[in-house]
Image (cartoon, rainbow, N blue to C red):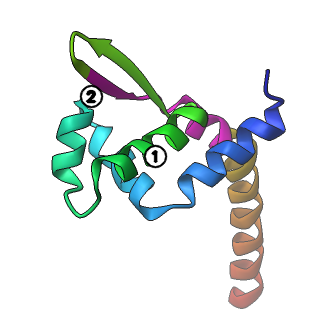
Amino acid sequence: MMSSEQRDDAVFKALANAKRRQMLDALKDAPQTTGSLCETFAEMDRCTVMQHLRVLEDAGLVIARREGRERWNHLDALPIKAIHDRWISQYAGHAINVLEALKEEVER
């Protein structure tokens, strides 16, 4: 079982790669088969696509389901929301407060 810190590290690692972010974007509207993703990312061979999907799965960002011979990849955005809730929202609020204080200072 991964600690929350290890889970966060896996999500940040997965999101650090542009191709993996593009894959998540491709899955945003609907699940896709691995074959479909290979067609979308034709500049990569199937093995490379599968490696990227594995990193996304390990981070909990993609859930793969087998249906017959097809492997369907589903986006799970909950780990991204957890990162947002833990890191981004806290710092965004602080940044807004700093900007408001700066605005007030400039207007004086």
- Pointer 2: what residue? 31
Q: Quote the CA–CA distance across marks 1 and 2.
A: 18 Å
Image quarter of the N terminus = top right
Camera-side residue of 108 and 95: 95
Q: Is residue 49 left or right of residue 9?
A: left
Give the image quarter of residue 62.
top left
Between discs 1 and 2, the one toward the N terminus: 2
For the point 29% across and 59% down, the residue is: 44
Quarter of the picture holding the C terminus: bottom right
Image x and y of residue 101, in percent = 77, 74
Magenta stretch: give its range: 71-84
Which is more toward the observer, 53 or 95?
A: 53
Residue type beneath disc 1: Gln
Numbered badge on residue 87: none
Q: Is residue 80 above or below residue 22?
A: above
Packing grade of label 2 (10 A; few <14, some 14-19, many >=20) is some
**Mark in front: 1 vs 2:** 1
The residue nearer to you, when weighing 14 against 68, is 68
Q: Is residue 80 left or right of residue 21?
A: right
Q: Position of residue 100 (x, y in %)?
A: 70, 71
Residue bearing mark 1: 51
Q: Secondary structure at mark 1?
A: helix
